[in-house]
Image: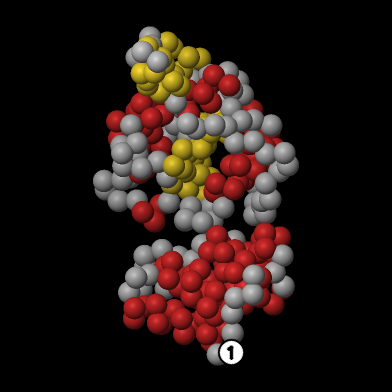
Amino acid sequence: MNRPETAPELPYYEAFGDEEAVFAAAWRNRLPLLIKGPTGCGKTRFVSHMAARLGLPLYTVACHDDLTAADLVGRHLIGDGSTVWCDGPLTRAVREGGICYLDEVVEARKDTTVVLHPLADDRRLLPIDRTGELLQAPPSFMLVVSYNPGYQNLLKGMKPSTRQRFVSLRFDFPDAAREEQILLRETRCDADLARRLVGIARALRQLKDHDLEESVSTRLLVYAALLVRDGMDPVAACRSAIVESLTDDPEVAEALGEVVAASFGR
């Protein structure tokens, strides 16, 4: 069962522009928000940060090919000889006036995203066909969706009729100084390690669309830094946390490993 995420303090987030102001303004004006950017660049952390900052319950749904409208809205369940209705995360967010965050929304089935349309325009309605309810979203409710444009194709693109219902933000990987600061704050590693890891990431990101399907995320840098802090050799940590997470091709992995080794003077 999806339960709202709660946070006693603001999740750490390093802003890069006016994204916090845009999010807050969209929420105040009851507008849905679309966040697009590469995997691991901070989209989910940003939403968690803003939900805590606004004091709202957050329901996060990781979208996938098998996600159905019932997974979002709810379904009847059989228990103790009777049938009871169980709200889905979208319905609970509407009832509670919280935030529903659909991560990688383009991965969901097309018939699933149709249920979002009346919530993502000025009607702000959620029809529940199986119970006959028509929920009016309260002022504090917000719909937030995200996706990675790098995965977008003709089969999994967002329809214009859906896209144009949202205020949009574009995210990218942090600049070097900001990414180093994130590593220092998230892992408490030393400044030299943070600098080397960010240098590796910037070098490997230049290979995107050539030898790699996906770029090095800030998340993977955090993993590597944590392994090093735990006593692992830096090159071995980067191999496990970065190289092997990016490719299954032995030759490409060897080439990436050489970049890592050179960064640590090996």
Q: Image height check: is 56 above or below 266?
A: above
Task: Tell me what residue is drawn at x 62 percent, y 66 percent.
Answer: 226
Task: Tell me what residue is drawn at x 54 percent, y 80 percent.
Answer: 235
Image x and y of residue 31, in percent: 54, 29
User: Taking 73 as reference, is 45 left or right?
Assistant: right
Task: Tell me what residue is drawn at x 40 percent, y 23 percent.
Answer: 74
Find residue 245 and report its image quarter: bottom left
**Mark count:** 1
Q: Image height check: is 46 above or below 40?
A: above
User: Taking 150 as reference, is 217 left or right?
Assistant: right
Image x and y of residue 40, in percent: 51, 56
Find residue 131 and report its image quarter: top left
Image x and y of residue 42, in percent: 56, 52
Question: Can you identify the residue that label 1 sits on?
Answer: 265
Image x and y of residue 222, in percent: 59, 63
* In front of the other: 260 or 234: 234
Q: In the rendered image, is residue 225 in sight?
A: no
Q: In the rendered image, is residue 11 in sight?
A: yes
Find residue 6 and report its image quarter: top right
Quarter of the image that includes the C terminus = bottom right
User: Taking 143 as reference, is 7 left or right?
Assistant: right
Q: Image height check: is 188 above or below 114?
A: below
- Badge 1 density bin: few <14, some 14–19, many ≥20, Cα 10 Å: few
Q: Residue furthest top?
A: 132
Task: Tell me what residue is drawn at x 67 percent, y 39 percent.
Answer: 7
* In front of the other: 127 or 79: 79
Instruction: Identify the amino acid type marked 1.
Output: Gly
Q: Image height check: is 240 above or below 93?
A: below
Q: Residue furthest front?
A: 80
